[in-house]
């Protein structure tokens, strides 16, 4: 791997902060760009040599380092690596990050340096993060005695980071994914069209103001569930209710996706102007996102892409630094505001139906897999079975949507009631209302048609039992589920084919018949269908990251973003078709552990991220 022949440099910047100016109050981009930003000093550790502190007057030492032959290691490299490039113009040959690695190894545990140190060195009190940083809070220029304290604090952090890194066993391919993800942020290549974003923001604010005026109500009333419920009651209306997941009590069903709210709005069309105003007030995400896009842009127009490696339990990426590009709507103007540099295109490729394909492969549902391999429209095929007549995309969009919802939703054990509610909510398509009996017939039809998938949920229940049983075995005992397809079962974990694991700490059965494990904020609950979903998402994620590694090797291409099943690159305009075809080809290579998995990708290229 690239970093093996490089000099390892562990680095930690210490920077000025106060009660109002800190990463708790601001994004990394805002914090580093602010005129108050100041580097107090930096700790540098070359390989296993002792860490050296360099104060604010000795930062030129950074330019004496052979960065082309250096791998940078930090705890949260999105911060230190960003400073290194934005303030010093320095890009190392390779990025490493113990916080990211920790999330990969223990996705349900804290990735702070303090907590990682306790986990890795539980008996060694000398391996603990210090508390001296607070002594320098609000002091711009450190006096010698306080600088000595901060230097000692920094050196301890560097030594901890280095020791933790050397204690971690981590797949080389995943280190490469961390490098790619970090470089997206630290060395930005996308350009933000600020004019388009300003126009979009002004339009959104004007739209909100117009809807507020049309409603005749105040922003405060519309934004408060309690006040809005009281207003509805004053109009003689019955407030729609739903059961609270956390308390089990009745609460107002005011979410735009609540079935009860959908029914309520349909029954009261004369209040549409009120409903529209409330939705606009409650969902300021477009305005907020536009403001954050502008705040994240650099003076040269570049736009850093903040992605969190291993944000989800299953390894999926997530947003960070208050910008979540993972939920940027496909038709959003903000997508089109992300531009390629001059003489370059934004190349976008999207894996088609990767989870559904992976589910069919993992379950052994060979007939469904064959349909995918033949390039058939799976949604229309199942919709034809539902409606007992030929369904096609152009003439029967609603029926096809029902088939699509079934294929994408029923594979993890969804029942008739939830399936019916999903269709009625119309979240990703038209609103479809159907009797419970009809919804139940479709669910049963799915389960009988794709009986191998139905059997997989039971098999995954056995996986849960095996994870529990393997904790109490002594010696090596072979079980039926050793090396099932691409996975194997271990104590409280499922071992994935890329060397990572799905972990379920303290997994145990519940009296109700399910299972629970220790999650981020207490116990989380699972069952066969849910575990099926976790496995399929984890395996699908590996297919996508493997494609990223292949694409990164294509000459002239730089990966600048990944969104769910999309990979977005920047590349020259010359030979655009050849370059795009190379990306599609790289996306469609099946993994070695699933050679018969039929993959398909589509996309395009333009001057902006317009797909």
Image (spheres, rainbow, N blue to C red):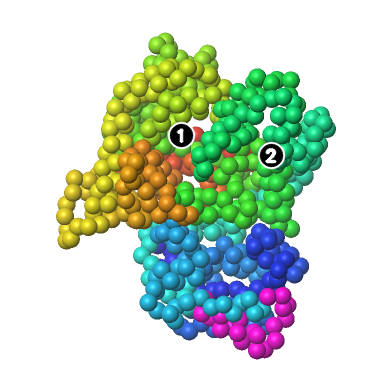
- Position of residue 202 measured from the top left corner of the image (x, y, whole percent): 79, 41
Circles 2 and 1: CB atoms closer than 8 Å: no
Instruction: Label 2: state its secondary structure.
Output: helix
Q: Is residue 229 left or right of residue 326?
A: right
- Position of residue 420 measured from the top left corner of the image (x, y, whole percent): 48, 24
Chain part drawn in magenta? 137-158
Q: Is 559 or 344 nearer to us in this picture?
A: 559
Q: Residue at x 58, y 42 (%)?
A: 327
Which image quadrant: the N terminus?
A: bottom left
Assess disc 2: are there few (<14), some (14-19) or many (≥20) residues with their C-alpha within 10 Å of its C-alpha.
few
Q: Nearer the viewer, mark 2 or mark 1?
A: 2
Numbered label tally: 2
- Position of residue 508 measured from the top left corner of the image (x, y, whole percent): 32, 51
Q: Residue at x 22, y 46 (%)?
A: 481
**Location of mark 2 (residue):** 226
Image quadrant assignment for residue 501: bottom left
Q: Residue at x 54, y 59 (%)?
A: 182
Which image quadrant: the C terminus?
A: top right
Q: Main secondary structure of the magenta part?
A: helix
- Farthest bottom residue in view: 145
Instruction: Label 1: state its secondary structure.
Output: loop
Give the CA distance from mark 2 to mark 1.
43 Å
Q: Is residue 17 left or right of residue 413?
A: right
Q: Is 109 or 337 nearer to us in this picture?
A: 109
Relative to 26, say whether 288 is above or below: above
Residue 536 shows in the view = no
- Would residue 521 be counted in the magenta stretch? no
- Residue 352's disc number: 1
């Amino acid at each position: 791997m690239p970093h093996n022949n490089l000099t390892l440099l562990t680095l930690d910047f210490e920077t000025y902060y106060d009660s109002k100016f800190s990463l708790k109050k601001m994004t990394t981009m805002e914090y580093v760009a602010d005129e108050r930003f100041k580097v107090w000093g930096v700790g540098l550790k070359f390989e296993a040599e002792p860490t050296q502190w360099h104060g604010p007057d000795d930062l030129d030492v950074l330019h004496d380092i052979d960065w082309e032959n250096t791998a940078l290691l930090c705890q949260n490299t999105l911060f230190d690596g960003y400073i290194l490039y934005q303030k010093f113009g320095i890009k190392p040959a390779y990025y490493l990050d113990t916080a990211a690695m920790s999330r990969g190894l223990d996705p349900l545990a804290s990735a702070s340096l303090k907590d990682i140190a306790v986990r890795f060195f539980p008996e060694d009190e000398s391996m603990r993060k210090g508390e001296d940083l607070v002594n320098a809070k609000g002091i711009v220029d450190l006096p010698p005695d306080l600088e000595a304290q901060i230097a000692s604090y920094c050196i301890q952090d560097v030594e901890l980071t280095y020791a933790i890194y050397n204690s971690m066993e981590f797949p080389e391919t995943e280190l490469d994914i961390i490098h790619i993800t970090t470089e997206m942020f630290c060395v930005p290549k996308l350009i933000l069209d600020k004019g388009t974003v300003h126009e979009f923001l002004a339009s959104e604010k004007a739209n909100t103001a117009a809807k507020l005026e049309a409603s005749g109500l105040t922003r405060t009333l519309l934004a408060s569930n309690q006040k809005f419920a009281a207003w509805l009651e004053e109009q003689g209306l019955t407030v729609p209710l739903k059961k609270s997941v956390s308390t089990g009590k009745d609460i107002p069903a005011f979410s735009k996706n609540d079935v009860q709210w959908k029914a309520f709005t349909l029954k009261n069309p004369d209040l549409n102007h009120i409903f529209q105003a409330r939705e606009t007030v409650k969902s300021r995400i477009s305005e907020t996102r536009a403001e954050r896009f502008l705040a994240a842009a650099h003076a040269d127009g570049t736009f850093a892409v903040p992605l969190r490696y291993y944000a989800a339990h299953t390894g999926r990426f997530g947003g960070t630094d208050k910008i979540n590009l993972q939920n940027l709507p496909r038709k959003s103007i903000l997508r089109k505001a992300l531009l390629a540099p001059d003489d370059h295109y934004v190349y976008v490729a999207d894996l088609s139906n990767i989870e559904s394909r992976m589910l069919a492969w993992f379950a052994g549902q060979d007939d469904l897999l064959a349909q995918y391999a033949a390039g058939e429209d799976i949604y229309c095929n199942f919709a034809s079975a539902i409606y007992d007549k030929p369904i096609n995309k152009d003439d029967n969009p609603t029926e096809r949507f029902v088939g699509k919802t079934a294929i994408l939703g029923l594979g993890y054990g969804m029942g008739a009631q939830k399936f019916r509610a999903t269709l009625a909510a119309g979240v990703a398509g038209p609103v479809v209302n159907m009797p419970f009996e009809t919804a139940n017939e479709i669910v049963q039809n799915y389960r009988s048609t794709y009986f191998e998938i139905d059997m997989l949920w039971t098999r995954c229940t056995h996986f849960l039992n095996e994870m529990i049983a393997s904790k109490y075995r002594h010696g090596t005992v072979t079980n039926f589920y050793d090396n099932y397809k691409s996975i194997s079962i271990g104590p409280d974990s499922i071992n994935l084919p890329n060397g990572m694991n799905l972990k379920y700490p303290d997994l145990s059965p519940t009296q109700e018949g399910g299972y629970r494990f220790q999650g981020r904020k207490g116990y989380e609950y699972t069952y066969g269908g849910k575990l099926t979903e976790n496995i399929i998402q984890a395996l699908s994620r590996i297919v996508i990251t493997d494609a990223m590694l292949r694409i990164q090797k294509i000459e002239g291409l730089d990966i600048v973003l990944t969104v769910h099943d999309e990979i977005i690159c920047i590349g020259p305009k010359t030979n655009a078709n050849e370059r795009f075809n190379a990306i599609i080809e790289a996306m469609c290579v099946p993994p070695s552990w699933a050679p018969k998995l039929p993959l398909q990708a589509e996309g395009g290229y333009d001057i902006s991220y317009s797909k």
